[in-house]
Image (cartoon, helix red, strand yellow):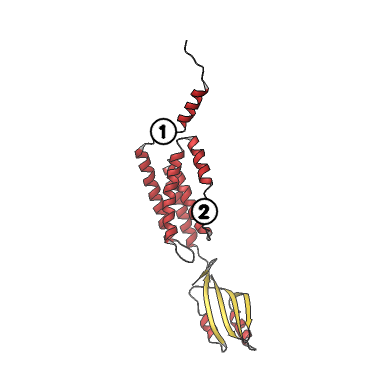
Amino acid sequence: MENNVTTSGDLFKKSFLEMFPDAIDPWSLVLTLAMSLLLGLGIFLVYRRCFIGVVYDHSFNISLVVMTILTAVIIVTISSNIMLSLGMVGALSIVRYRTAVKSPLDLMFLFWAITTGIAAGAGYYYIAWVAFLFVALVFAVLRGIRQRRETYMLILNYQTKEGLEEEIRRVLHNYKAKVRSKIVRGETTELTVEVLMRDDNLSLPNTLSALEGVNDVTLVQYRGSYEA
C-alpha cells in the first residue's frame, strides 16, 4: 500500500521548488520586449510632439521608453510565480525616488508608460495598443482645443510720479488684467500684472513703453511656470 503521508521535509522541498519560476518562452519574451519598445516609442513621439511646458526635457522622454520596457519585464518575471512576485514587490517598495515631477502632464505620461508596460508584460497586447491609440487621440484632441486668449505676466518698471499710474491703468483697462504685486523702491515702481491676451495681438508692451516715465516692460507667457 502506497504511503500517502506527507512529511514536513516534503512540504519544505515542495515550497522551495515552487519559488523558482518555470522557464519563460524566449519567443514570448522577445515579442513582449518588441511590443513594449514600439509602444514606448509611440509615447515618446506623442510627448515630443505635444509637449506643453517650459523646457523640453529629452532625457525624461527617453526614460518613458525605458520605463515601459522595464515595467513589462517586471510583469513577465512576477507573473510566473506568486512567491517571486511578493518578494519583488517588497524589494521595489524600499526604493525611494527623490526626483520631483513638477508638471501634472509629465506625471500623466509616467503613469501612461507604466500602464502600457503592465498591459504588454501581461500579454494583453491588443489592450495596450487600443489604449495607446485612444489616449493619444484624446490627448491630441484636447491639445488642439486651445483658448482664444493666453495668460501672460506683464512686469512694468516705471517712475513713481503723479498721473503715470493712472495712464497705465487706462491702457490696461482694455484687457482682462489683474494686479498681482506692486513694489515701490524710492523713485521707481515695479508692477506685476496678469493679462489675458491673444497670441496674434501683442502690441501692449509697445503701447506701455511709449508712455513717458516707463523704464522697462517685460511680457512672459505663464503656464504654471514662467515661459520666455
Q: Residue at x 52, y 74 (%)?
A: 220
Q: Nearer the viewer, mark 2 or mark 1?
A: 2
Q: Residue at x 41, y 56 (%)?
A: 62
Vertical order, 169 against 138 (above or below)? below
Looking at the rendered structure, the secondary structure element under dot 1 is loop
Q: Residues within 10 Å of mark 1 (few under 14, many from 20)?
A: few
Q: Which residue, as the protein is rendered here, is positioned at the far front?
A: 9
Residue type at mark 2: give it.
Tyr
Foreground residue, 159 or 48?
A: 159
Query: Where in the figure is residue 82, as x and y percent of width and height?
Result: 49, 35
Q: Residue at x 44, y 51 (%)?
A: 67
Instruction: Tell me if 170 is positioned left or right of 34 in this view.
Output: right
Q: Which residue, as the protein is rendered here, is positioned at the far left?
A: 27
Residue type at mark 1: give it.
Asp
Number of marks in picture: 2
Q: Please report contact status of discs 2 and 1: CB closer than 8 Å, yes or no.
A: no
Q: Residue at x 45, y 46 (%)?
A: 71
Vertical order, 173 against 141 (above or below)? below
Looking at the rendered structure, the secondary structure element under dot 2 is loop
Foreground residue, 131 or 20?
A: 20
Foreground residue, 211 or 92?
A: 92
Question: Which badge, 2 or 1, comes first in the chain's sequence?
Answer: 1
Residue on which the image places disc 1? 22
Vertical order, 46 against 14 (above or below)? below
Query: Where in the figure is residue 186, as x and y percent of width and height?
Result: 63, 85
Residue on which the image places disc 2? 97
| Residue 117 in sight here | yes
Q: Quadrant of residue 191?
A: bottom right
Foreground residue, 27 or 209?
A: 27
Q: Which mark is residue 188?
A: none
